[in-house]
Image (spheres, coloured by chain):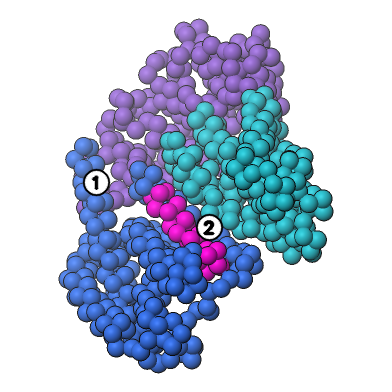
Chain colours: A cyan, B blue, C purple
Amino acid sequence: MIALLKRDLKLAVRAGGGFGLGLAFFLIVIVLVPFGVGPDAAVLTRIAPGMLWVAALLAALLSLDRIFALDFEDGSLPLLATSPLPLEGVTLIKGVAHWVTTGLPLTLAAPVLGFLLNLEPGAYVWLFASLALGTPALSMIGAFGAALTVGVKRGGLLMSLLVLPLYVPTLIFGAEAVRRGADGLDASVPMLMVAGITLGCFALLPFAAAAALRVNLR
Amino acid sequence: MSIWEYANPKKFIATTTPLVPWLMWTSVAILCVGLTWGFFFTPDDARQGSTVKIFYLHVPSAMMAINAWIMMLIASLIWLVRRHHVSALAAKAAAPIGIVMTVMALFTGAIWGQPMWGTWWAWDPRLTSFLILFLFYLGYVALWAAIEDSDTAADLTSVLCIVGSVFAVLSRYAVNFWNQGLHQPASLSLDKEENVADVFWYPALVCIAGFVLLFVALVLMRTATEIRLRRMRALEMRMRG
Amino acid sequence: MTLVVNDLTVARGGVPVLAGLSFEVSEGCALVLRGPNGIGKTTLLRTLAGLQPAHAGQVQFPEETGAYASHADGIKAQLTVLENLAFWGEVHGNDVPDAVFEAFDLVDLRDRLAGTLSAGQKRRLGLARLGVIGRKVLFLDEPTVSLDGFSVKMFARWLREDHLARGGVAVIATHIDLGLEAPELDLTPYKARVDLAGGSDEAFL
């Protein structure tokens, strides 16, 4: 399984686009926000937690369809399915690899982009922590969505339609944690909920994703 | 003789075809009685005036929106465990009806909410939950539509339905946490009749019964259509060899 | 190490295509599948490899010994020849033996990116994967597509000397003569009748 993780990371680095595109998209969305709502610092401060979370979520969504589609096209997937790796392990590793290449850079970049939206100083640590805890869930849910739609030609749009409603709880608790942090309130409850969702996703979704992959390989 | 015999498509069609018109007309009759009773023979609410009467459409459609999803979940589980095609097709058949019920609940809610709260839409937990439910329905229907092989589609939509149900419940709690809301608590449940006075409650029960029957009739009808479509495709496949 | 197939029916898209197949391939032997396009060779090989469920009947061989290979062989253009092979080796818990590079004439290409290889070279890389994963029961779907005559002989020699001679088993669908002394199985007589019962949509007919 480590071999698969190493290969996926290597591919992401060499193919380019893996790290860069998602981050660039994140930056552009955050830059567009003030153009849309006006430069008033007070307004930006108010909406910053939510906008940062929504933008990070959309950036993570961008690269989801590549999780399985590339391996499906070049025939790696049936070969992995007949290898000693359990398919559940494959989907788990794919989710982890996606997080390392998108969720992690987004988490690291988010505090910097927080300055652009005039985020409340007390909220930076919560922004970082909630994204660090929440983006793995986004990747794993995304891997499930990608496994469902891997057999569909041009399934990217369909996948977004399936995955985005599943993102609702993570987004609500994640953004709520940052908002409470910004207001100087105790943010531990939403943080624990985000952590719970992430753990639950990693415990259960690999099975659902592997089941979907098996159906699609049939 | 077991209930699973009806999972045979031919037997299913043979059994349900004569039933459907009866169910249909009964539900229409019950709905006519319930709605007429509710609209014209109940007093106006002291505070809300006659706007309250949209309740006879709003509450049953909201209940059926959720019940349709639960029915789809059960049918999906039966398909995954017992591989009865009729079960998968019944889940497929119920989804568009669920969508219509959800839209109806949202619409009647908006019409009710405008005079009551002074707004067509509020990000209230209940309203938001129904909007999210609507999105789940859309995804489910889109996945069915996107996959050509019907057994593959049935498998994948069943998995989506199960995972989606977990996330739908999770979303409900998340939304409650996120905004406490201005919606009144559920106005009706079978055991808490004290919520609503009897005069309103009886016609509402009649309306709910009508909606349930209508839903059953529509699902049976649409499932039969799906079975015939599958049969046509199967025959074409065999003819081509 | 024997592959036993007993009264197997395989289906494509829920419709049976081949029915009543029974054969046995014992240790050190290969079986060549013949038949016109669309008869169901790929479906049969995928079913044997366990990628899709058998419609009826049994396939028996020791667990975790089977491998499937088709013309899509999971080569990553951004990895070198060595890295590609090393990955599949690692997944199966093996190192990459130097002999593999010689057997498939990849010695000079070792550190080239797979994306820069020609079609035939890629094909050889794909086949070299079989020498790395150490699986004993191979299901090969048109393994020699886009190989020149020389490479075909090379592959046949590897199959004979390094695989079958060491107790391997192979089932091969191919249109050209590999020069193996292997029995052939013509699938035409096993074509499932159109009205054969048991399709996944049988209940609808």
Q: In 3D space, how far apart are the residues under numbered discs 1 and 2 (Cα atoms)? A: 30 Å
Mark 2 belongs to chain: B
Q: Which residue is mark 1?
A: B233
B120, C172: nearer the viewer: B120
SS under mark 1:
helix
Mark 1 belongs to chain: B
Q: In this picture, which residue range is highlighted in magenta? A: B122-144
Q: Is residue A186 above or below residue C132?
A: below
Q: Amino acid at mark 1?
A: Arg
Where residue B152 appears, as percent x and y from the top left, is 40, 47
A160, C74: nearer the viewer: A160
Q: Is residue A217 above or below residue C31?
A: below
Q: Is residue B88 left or right of residue B6?
A: right
Magenta stretch holds residue C111: no
Q: Are marks 1 and 2 in contact (CB under 8 Å)?
A: no
Q: Which residue is mark 2?
A: B163
From the image, state whether disc 1 or disc 2 is nearer to you. 2
For image coordinates 39% across by 62% down, the residue present is B103
For image coordinates 79% across by 64% down, the residue present is A186
